[in-house]
Amino acid sequence: MNHTASPEASRSRRRRKGPKTCHCCSKAVPFCWSCRCGFQICQACMQENVWGMSCNGITWQCPDCGGQNGFGNQ
C-alpha cells in the first residue's frame, strides 16, 4: 500500500496564501503571527505589544487563549 499523498491532497494541507487580517488593527497584511486558536497579529502590532506578550523574546503568549507560541528564532 502506497502512503504518499497525491499532489491534490498535499496542496490542500498547505497554508493559505494571501493577505491576513490582524485582530488588533483589523488591517489586511501579508504576514501575521498566528496562534493555533486562530488569533492573528501583524508585525507592527506585535512590536507595539511585545512587552506584554513576551517575557523572553523567544515565545509569546496569545491574549485570547493563553497559549504559548514561538517567534521561530531559536
Image (cartoon, rainbow, N blue to C red):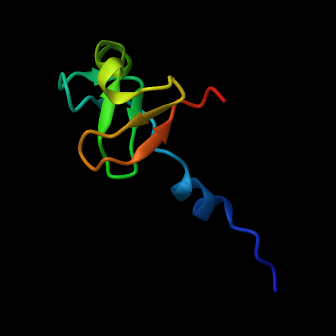
Residue 3: name its quadrant.
bottom right
Residue 44: name its quadrant.
top left
Name the residue at 23% across, 45% down. 64
Q: Position of residue 12 (x, y in %)?
A: 52, 57
Q: Total of numbered circles in the picture?
A: 0
Name the residue at 31% across, 29% down. 41
Q: Image quadrant for the N terminus? A: bottom right
Residue extending farthest to the right is 1
Q: Position of residue 25 (x, y in %)?
A: 18, 22
Residue 2: name its quadrant.
bottom right
In this view, 6 is above or below 61: below
Q: Position of residue 4 (x, y in %)?
A: 76, 69
Residue extending farthest to the bottom is 1
Mark yes or no: residue 20 visible.
no
Q: Position of residue 9 (x, y in %)?
A: 59, 64
Q: Image quadrant for the C terminus? A: top right
Name the residue at 40% across, 51% down. 36
Mark yes or no: residue 29 visible.
yes
**In the displayed structure image, the side of residue 72 where residue 20 appears, left or right:** left
Along the viewing direction, whichever of 62 and 44 lies nearer the viewer: 62
Along the viewing direction, whichever of 1 and 48 lies nearer the viewer: 48
In this view, 10 is above or below 43: below
Name the residue at 34% across, 29% down. 53
In this view, 62 is above or below 29: below
